[in-house]
Amino acid sequence: MTRVLTYGTFDTFHWAHMLLLQRARAMGDWLGVGLSTDEFNAIKGKTSVFNYAERENILRGIKYVDLIFPERTWEQKREDIVKYGADIFVIGDDWRGKFDDLSDLCRVVYLPRSPNISSTLIKQFIKTK
Ligand code: CTP
């Protein structure tokens, strides 16, 4: 059983989020998603359109996602990897190099980010309508 972990805000859920989750799940047999809490987003300087409960509810409907848990801090990843027995940590390559320190615990993989789509772009698009 290969266990995969990923993290993110997944606000205004879009096709590139789906592709990332699909690819992440295809790397193993189980995918856990650390979903950024509203408080953690505030720390990151992000405000989401949808709150944690709404974003979680969307992710619950995605067949590639086996478990959703709150991401509250930058530091929790090491604990999560051990707790969930993760073999692979995967995230988009906008984070390339940022999580290499986890490679003593599991494989760290950066997947290519899809072009021309992001929560930020969707929010800007809605604002200009
Ligand atoms: N992601 C991706 N391709 C995109 C957008 C996101 O592969 N075009 C990936 C990110 O690399 C990350 C996951 O989706 O692994 C969740 O990213 P998140 O930051 O929640 O979404 P973004 O759309 O990038 O949001 P923002 O504009 O707020 O950064």
Image (tube, rainbow, N blue to C red):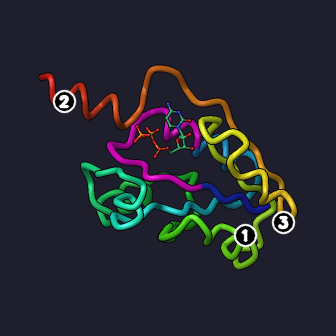
Q: Name the residue rendered at 62%, 42% in the picture.
A: 95
Q: Is mark 1 within 8 Å of ligand 1?
A: no
Amino acid bearing label 1: Ile
- 17 within the magenta span: yes
Amino acid bearing label 3: Leu
Q: Name the residue rendered at 78%, 60% in the picture.
A: 102
Q: Name the residue rendered at 24%, 49% in the picture.
A: 49
Q: Residues within 10 Å of mark 1 (few under 14, many from 20)?
A: many
* Residue sitting at the far right: 104
Q: Which quarter of the rendered picture does the N terminus lie within?
A: bottom right
Q: Name the residue rendered at 43%, 26% in the picture.
A: 117
Position of 68 with respect to 108 (left or right) is left
Task: Say which mark, if any, is on residue 105.
Answer: 3
Say above or below: 35 vs 97.
below
User: Dot 2 lies on which element?
Assistant: helix
Tell me whether circle 1 and circle 3 mark residues in contact (CB < 8 Å).
Answer: yes
| Front position in the image: 101 or 62 | 101
Marks 1/3: CA–CA distance: 7 Å
Mark 2 or 3, nearer chain start:
3
Q: Which residue is mark 2?
A: 126
- Residues shaded magenta: 7-20
Q: Which residue is mark 1?
A: 81
Marks 2/3: CA–CA distance: 41 Å
